[in-house]
């Protein structure tokens, strides 16, 4: 009996928790509410069918340890449930509203431990920085004549979210998004492309070959040139616009294996352009 048949039999023998149907419905409702809350942000999201299902199932996993344990034991779906697990919470303190979803790469690979520690550090720094900013804003507001009654009308949203862009048996590509919205707004995204089988980061060179810089530059410039003038907010190269990619350029990998290069808001274009994405094909 081959490995797939053994996995299939074990999968079919796994008992289905009685609360599964209700939990999935709850997950769907939560996913819809989160989408409505986030849809007004300036950045673009592109959830595919697999990522959407992943979000719904994770919502149920957070609610039911029984379901989580059952799912983790299913070999056919094991990669889906073991690559990323989620820790999430929502709370309000001093008119600051937190909505936090922290991914964790569940693997014995050294790179997983490094990435998990890095993500947690960045989340902690983000939350601490936002709390400090809110305190300083309060002090400035009161020092310039504001009242506590007026201050009570103000609030801040602090968000930590992530999105799985693609996943295979041995690789995963995802983005962690740190943002805040109050009297101003800010957003920082961190992209992770991991090869867990070989315990290393995946690079654009791995995906595109030795000529990856030239391939990226030609593709990106070509897409910029093809953009209609009324939609093209990119700066000229001599004024801070696009010139070239390098090893620090952010990207993610789509489920079809195509890399997508990402430039943060204001990096190569006016703020009205938002976050810019360019798919790269050989």
Image (cartoon, rainbow, N blue to C red):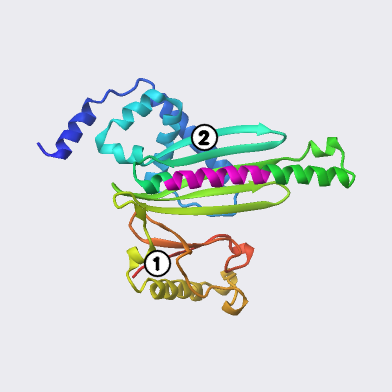
Q: Where residue 205 sits in the image (x, y, percent)?
A: 36, 66
Image position, residue 220 (x, y; %): 46, 71
Q: Nearer the viewer, residue 15 or 82?
A: 82
Query: Does 125 lie within the magenta span?
Result: yes
For the C terminus, the quadrant is: bottom left
In which quadrant of the rendered view does residue 70 lie? Answer: top left
Q: Where is residue 61 in the image (x, y as percent from the top left)?
A: 41, 30
Q: Mark 2 points at which residue?
A: 88
| Residue for point 54% across, 37% down | 33
Q: In the image shown, does 168 or 229 lie closer to the viewer?
A: 168
Disc 2, disc 1: CB below 8 Å? no
Q: In which quarter of the image is residue 215?
A: bottom left
Which residue has dot 1 on it?
280
Which residues, given as a range, are shown in magenta?
114-130
Q: Which of marks 2 and 1 is in front?
A: 2
Q: Earlier in the sequence, mark 2 or mark 1?
A: 2
Q: Is residue 43 above or below residue 230?
A: above
Question: Residue farthest to the left?
Answer: 1
Residue 108 at x, y percent in the picture: 34, 41
User: Which residue is drawn at the image coordinates 43% and 39% (left, top)?
Assistant: 55
Q: Is residue 276 toward the left or the right of residue 215 in the image?
A: right
Q: Distance between the residues labelled 2 and 1?
A: 33 Å
């Amino acid at each position: 009996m081959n490995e797939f048949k053994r996995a299939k039999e074990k999968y079919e023998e796994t008992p289905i928790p009685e609360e599964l149907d209700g939990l999935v419905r709850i997950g769907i409702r939560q996913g819809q509410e989160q989408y409505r809350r986030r849809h007004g942000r300036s950045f673009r999201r592109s959830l595919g069918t697999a990522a959407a299902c992943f979000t719904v199932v994770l919502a149920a996993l957070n609610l039911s340890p029984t379901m989580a344990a059952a799912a983790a034991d299913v070999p056919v779906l094991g990669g889906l449930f073991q690559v990323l697990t989620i820790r999430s919470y929502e709370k309000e303190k001093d008119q600051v509203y937190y909505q936090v979803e922290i991914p964790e790469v569940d693997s014995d690979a050294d790179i997983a431990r490094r990435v998990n520690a890095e993500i947690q550090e960045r989340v902690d720094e983000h939350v601490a920085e936002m709390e400090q900013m809110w305190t300083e804003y309060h002090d400035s507001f009161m020092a310039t004549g504001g009242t506590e009654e007026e201050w009570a009308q103000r609030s801040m949203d602090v968000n930590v979210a992530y999105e799985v862009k693609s996943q295979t048996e041995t690789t995963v590509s995802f983005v962690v998004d740190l943002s805040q919205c109050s009297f101003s707004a800010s957003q920082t995204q961190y992209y992770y492309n991991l090869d867990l089988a070989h315990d290393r980061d995946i690079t654009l060179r791995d995906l595109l070959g030795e000529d990856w810089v030239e391939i990226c530059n030609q593709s990106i410039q070509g897409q910029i040139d093809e953009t209609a003038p009324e939609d093209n907010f990119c700066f000229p190269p001599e004024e801070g616009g696009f010139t070239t990619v390098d090893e620090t350029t952010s990207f993610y990998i789509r489920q079809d294996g195509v890399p997508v290069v990402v430039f943060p808001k204001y990096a190569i274009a006016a703020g009205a352009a938002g976050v810019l994405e360019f798919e790269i094909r050989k």
